[in-house]
Image (cartoon, helix red, strand yellow):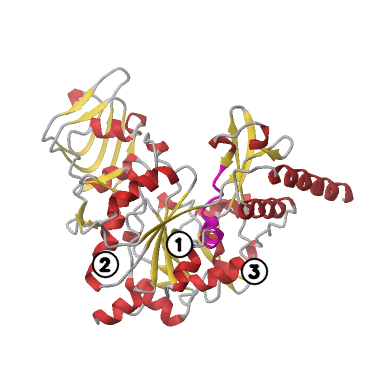
Amino acid sequence: MATTAVSVDEKLDKLRAEVAKLDQISENEKSGFISLVSRYLSGEAEQIEWSKIQTPTDEVVVPYDTVASPPEDLEETKKLLDKLVVLKLNGGLGTTMGCTGPKSVIEVRNGFTFLDLIVIQIESLNKKYGCNVPLLLMNSFNTHDDTQKIVEKYSNSNIEIHTFNQSQYPRIVTEDFLPLPSKGKSGKDGWYPPGHGDVFPSLNNSGKLDILLAQGKEYVFVANSDNLGAIVDIKILNHLINNQNEYCMEVTPKTLADVKGGTLISYEGRVQLLEIAQVPDEHVNEFKSIEKFKIFNTNNLWVNLKAIKRLVEAEALKMEIIPNPKEVDGVKVLQLETAAGAAIRFFDKAIGINVPRSRFLPVKATSDLLLVQSDLYTLVDGFVIRNPSRANPANPSIELGPEFKKVANFLARFKSIPSIVELDSLKVSGDVWFGSGITLKGKVTIIAKPGVKLEIPDGDVLENKDVNGPEDL
């Protein structure tokens, strides 16, 4: 056993020596990285004892309907909102959807980007209540420069916008456990942003946390910039302030599409996040079942700012480490990451709130873009509102083939977005082109044979139909 311990120490010493020479990152980043790696090497990851897992009660995961309504008085509401800051995780690129630059600048609807909608929402809130809710954007080194330029267009808005960067850590070469940048990889490929669990130390290291506390701010509402449902909810904020909950995770009922999402459990008297990666193989199917684990994490998080300050300074936020193996130009590398939701177990009086599905509307692919650009939604004051004339509470399931994966191709293949209010499911693959004013209802499958260009004519109504060629139209 002793030999292993020596080799771990040696590994760490060598890594530490090389990291010390990297002048692209700050001392805070270096020490944060080394502490993450040493936790990983010491193997301190606790194994979850399956038998100890308990389903959280309604006190721990509070049903949204039971949360008291906020005060109706405008002045009281203003007081509440003046304690709030909105933080959007803005580190992701739009690469999976074929876009360059930050994902938050993809146009979602009516020519507005994710960021436009976020700014319009907070502007209307500040205007309606006369409050001052600032917007923070946590960028990564991948999105920082572009975001700085983009934010300039909002300089005349009534919002204070702060940007800060999450940490930049060196990728580790798997073979000899040394940092990739010290091997001549000085470009962006040598580095990685260590997941959104980094939001807490980065908020503190950037100096933004102290500025907000000095302004009397008490809570931060953290959400992914691509979740169109993550809007400020005064009812939740009021509940947290009244009950002194330091942390709240919004969860929502699982559907079959969400079986891999993290869930909240009660474990040894505390509420904590259980991710699929922590589940022993023999229990994975049970984890995915909707019967036992009925909810999943939306990554809409409400956190007390003083509590963040206290825990970051005590170095107490030791979230589960997610090892993420990658390959860069044929070299196998490792990046260690953490998730913000996993921090729930370190905060006092932490709760989940089981919110309506409408608060989780992420746009991860062009199939999601089809939903939000369709007549299933309308846009009011920057808020994406669901069409009440759809009877089914669930959205239609949409599968688009690789021809639709990039936003530019997706937009080119639809002359206009079809009406889908009465659609249950749509599956499209092959060289398919949609005309304008098309209506899709029930279950529709459109599969073009290889080498065949299939055009759906303007104004067509397809109801419960399988289309394999022009003859089926």
Task: Please identify the quarter of the rendering in which residue 369 is found.
Answer: top left
Vertical relation: 388 (above or below) 93:
below
Q: Are marks 1 and 2 in contact (CB under 8 Å)?
A: no
| Whole-percent x, y for residue 322 in the image | 60, 50
| Whole-percent x, y for residue 220 in the image | 43, 67
How far is the residue under mark 2 from the one under mark 3? 35 Å
Amino acid carrying label 1: it is Lys
Earlier along the polypeptide chain: callout 1 or callout 2? Answer: 2
Amino acid carrying label 2: it is Leu
Q: Secondary structure at mark 3?
A: loop
Nearest to the eye among marks 3 and 1: give it: 3
Q: Secondary structure at mark 1?
A: loop
Please state if 48 lies on the left or on the right of 385 as rendered. Answer: right
> Which range of residues does the magenta coloring cover?
192-205
Where the C terminus falls, by quadrant?
top left
Was residue 198 drawn as part of the magenta stretch in this picture?
yes
Q: Are marks 2 and 3 in contact (CB under 8 Å)?
A: no
Please tell me the numbered disc located at residue 309: none
Q: Which residue is mark 1?
A: 294
Amino acid carrying label 3: it is Ala
In this orientation, which residue lies closer to the viewer: 267 or 170? 170
| Main secondary structure along the magenta-highlighted residues | helix
Q: Which residue is mark 2?
A: 125
Please tell me the numbered disc located at residue 314: 3
How far is the residue under mark 1 from the one under mark 2? 33 Å
Give neighbour class at mark 2: few <14, some 14-19, many 20+ (Cα, 10 Å).
Answer: some
